[in-house]
Amino acid sequence: MINISFHKCSCALALSLALVAPSFALAEKVLRRANDLSYGGSESLDPLSPSRFYEVTDLIYNRLIRPTADGGTAPELALTWVPNETAMEWTLTLRSGVRFHDGSDFEAADVKYSLERINDPALESPVASVLGIISSVDVIDPLTVKINLSAPHAGLPLLLYDYRVRMIPNGSGDMIASSGIGTGPFMLESFDAESMTQLVANPNYWDGAPKLDRISFTAIADQEARNQAMLAGQLDLNSLSRDQEPFYKDNPAFTLQNFPVGDWFGIAFLSDEGALTDPRVRKALRIAVDRQEMMNLLAGAGNAELTCDNPVKKSDPFRADISCPQDITGAKALLAEAGYPDGIDIELYTSDLEPGMLQFSEVYQQQVAKAGIRIDLKVAPADGYWDNVWFYKNAMTSWGERPADQWLNEVYRTGADWNESHYANPAFDALLDEARSTLDQARARDLYVKAQEMLFEEGSTFIPYQENGRRVMSSKVTGIAPVGEDFIDWHLVDMAK
């Protein structure tokens, strides 16, 4: 039997975190949210920044192509996208009549600038590991661009709906981190990631004026403090962990949502340090876990899908089907072969940054102890966790859904900026290169599957399940469907006065 100790903070902590809202006009519809301060105040409004202010950038910028809930693509700022016969060139027709927040027209030159900027080494953007294949962009006319690739890629539209590939004005790179000028449904009024950030409705939004007047963000680093602020009526929208749901259930002041997404918690072990350089040790750390029990404890039956350290969601056509029951005997044998017959000591960093992170690491610690794996848990501050701990330590990690190609290239390719486990294997990279270059989708699937199977055998990231998303809203909020945040039409969100 596994015991879980839930970490709570007092309501006073939430109140002490300065949820002091400015006095808005009484007639305004204001949606109050929190940002998690996960980059310690260095949050940037540059959508390509490794420390982008993601809660805000989703609202002030648009993509060329948007994802659909079933894994497809739909027009956003681009209306059509057509490849040539080799998929080395893609021609996009742009939406007319779109304006940036400063009143300037959105045109092909802005697309060229926004896409070619991805490969700027000074930005150190992780998007380059996925879209670095864009060699150049040609302006055909004000509403037509041609994207030239360095290698064929039949799946380019799936990559262009990356949540960071947002359109900014031509030449605005030096100031976009603070100006936030986009074409999105909301415009920046004030920006202070460590205190409050205010967005106002864009009355000229191309898809229709937003129903809300503004969205107000307050920085609250601790997830339980955010929960207490929600309970106190100081927020109108927040994400939840399973143990927080009972506080809101059957309460008419709140609306709960539970929805399938490809999001997951995991543990990224640094594959280039100490004992972890041995793939046998890395596999032992992963197969010693009873994933079903862990999922039932932390997510609840029916609230998640089991996965075998595979980041690709179940509905993705390129997902590999792998089986991974708990194997304590096998884990002990692998450790003994690697020179650790008496077990091994591993330091693991965790945090109270997101709902459920601490509990996840505690359950993992207790389960793998049966295989002689002794986990020394270190609880790091939530403030600045992604900047100071993640990527540098064996640490808890958290990701949102992506297409298979993006997962495998951005998080596991050798040298990729967001390769959190520092995994490096030329044979793995070669599989990805071949998959991208083929126009035969069946062949591409075989190659992506082999890459995922390779990760299970020798990778360094533990992913036991992909959990449904949970959110709570004030009952006054309408227009938010039970879908991931990436699929919300923010200009349709409304709020009763």
Image: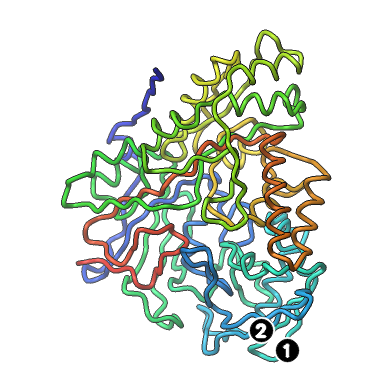
Query: Front-most of 205 and 135?
Result: 135
Task: Give the image quarter of residue 160.
Answer: bottom right
Tell whether 423 sits left or right of 215.
Answer: right
Determine whether 84 is above or below 243 in the image: below
SS for callout 1 = strand
Task: Report x, y in % for residue 29.
Answer: 27, 68
Task: Tell me the residue at 35%/45% (across/down).
Answer: 18
Per the rendering, the mark at residue 140 is 1
Does the image show residue 447? Answer: yes
Per the rendering, the mark at residue 108 is 2
Query: Alpha-carbon neighbours of circle 1 within 10 Å: few (<14), some, or many (≥20)?
Result: some
Task: Report x, y in % for residue 425.
Answer: 80, 41
Quadrant assignment for the N terminus: top left
Farthest-out residue, top: 342
Task: Report x, y in % for residue 478.
Answer: 27, 65
Q: Are marks 1 and 2 in contact (CB under 8 Å)?
A: yes
Task: Report x, y in % for residue 113.
Answer: 70, 75
Determine whether 412 is above or below 75 in the image: above
- N-terminal of the two: label 1 or label 2? 2
Q: Amino acid at mark 1?
A: Ile
Per the rendering, the mark at residue 176 is none
Query: Front-most of 31 and 425?
Result: 425
Task: Tell me the residue at 41%/66% (across/down).
Answer: 199
Query: Front-most of 328 and 53?
Result: 328
Q: Amino acid at mark 2?
A: Ala
